[in-house]
Amino acid sequence: MRISRVTVPEFREKKSRGERVAVLTAYDATMARLLDRGGVDALLVGDSLGMVVLGYESTVPVTLDDMIHHTRAVVRGSSRALVIADMPFLSYQTSTADAVRNAGRLIQEGAAAVKIEGGQAVLDAVERLVDIGIPVMGHLGLLPQSVNQIGGYRKQATTSAEADRLLSDARALERAGAFAIVLESIPADVAATVTKAVKVPTVGIGAGPDCDGQVLVSYDMLGLFDGFVPSFVKKYANLADEVVSATRTYVEEVKQQQFPPRAESVADIDRSRR
Ligand code: KIV
């Protein structure tokens, strides 16, 4: 039986049915396959891959080519989840034409939608992309691509003026046609207000329990990333310890000549035969 992918309309309509959406990031085919088997509604090829798999200090150095490379892998590895690709820094801010060209590349590689950070500043791009048939997920609150402007990864919308601006950005993104909005690192009550105010699903990360769904960086929730992990992340596993422990055992067995066992090795050459 062929299992079809979650579509953008199905994802959006989960809100009206009162069904929460569960989203995780993925960057490669193997992990995408496992998370897909776990039943996530969507896989986000986040530009967090810059930190998680490429070893950068922020998402700023991530290029469109990086995103295309990893989006292809996630599409190949998964069969059911909606695949959303992040548009990296400078791939949509320079002009609407650049946004169209670059989002188009990610869609041609198999993503069903793209994600763009920002509110008022990106509305033209969002409107144009949606107009030409490219679904867009918005992203408000902490915008990691603006880390140099913010000066760190800190909570946003903590004053009533900032909360009001975020609410009007969310409404504007909805009007521009965004099918969902990520709310990152904002107070839970602000996220709850935004969630009530818009018809499209809000997907929270560090934004409390009242969003329409949640997204986490998969390596964080699996306990696989050994760098900084935000305090709101729940670790559902501790894979980093498992990897280190398995590696230590392997190294020890190789040094002690316990692996590979002689009995399981390919038989010696039969020298009696030519
Ligand atoms: O890049 C990313 O992983 C993200 C999520 C944290 C929402 O944007």
Image: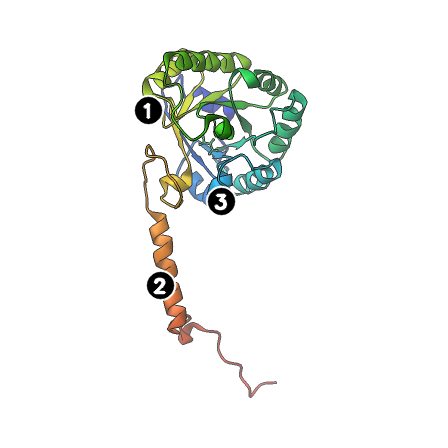
Q: How many numbered callouts?
A: 3
Residue at the bottom extreme? 272
Sequence order check, earlier mark of 2 and 3: 3
Q: Nearer the viewer, residue 179 or 8?
A: 179
* Type of amino acid under label 1: Gly
Q: Which residue is mark 2?
A: 249
Question: Is the residue 180 above or below the residue 61 in the image?
Answer: above
Say whether marks 1 and 2 touch (CB < 8 Å).
no
Residue 235 placement: quadrant: top left
Q: Where 272 sits versus 79, above or below?
A: below
Q: Name the quarter where the C terminus is drawn.
A: bottom right
Q: Provide the residue designation for mark 1.
A: 208
Q: Where does the image place residue 272, in percent across and percent down from the top left?
A: 55, 88
Earlier in the chain: of badge 1 and badge 2, it is: 1
Q: Secondary structure at mark 1?
A: loop
Sort mark 1 into few (<14), some (14-19) or many (20+) by Cα contacts within 10 Å: some
Q: Which residue is mark 3?
A: 53
On whether ligand 1 comes within 8 Å of the CB at mark 3, the answer is no
Callout 3 amino acid? Val
Determine whether the residue tagged by mark 3 lies in a helix, strand or loop: loop
Q: Report the Cα–Cα distance between label 2 and label 3.
A: 24 Å
Left or right of 133? Residue 44 is left
Q: Ligand 1: does it lie within 8 Å of the C-beta at label 1?
A: no
State how far apart marks 1 and 2 are (Cα).
40 Å
Label for residue 19? none
Let me know if residue 1 appears in the view. Answer: no
Please give the name of the residue rendered at 53% of the width and 83% of the height, measured from the top-left corner.
270
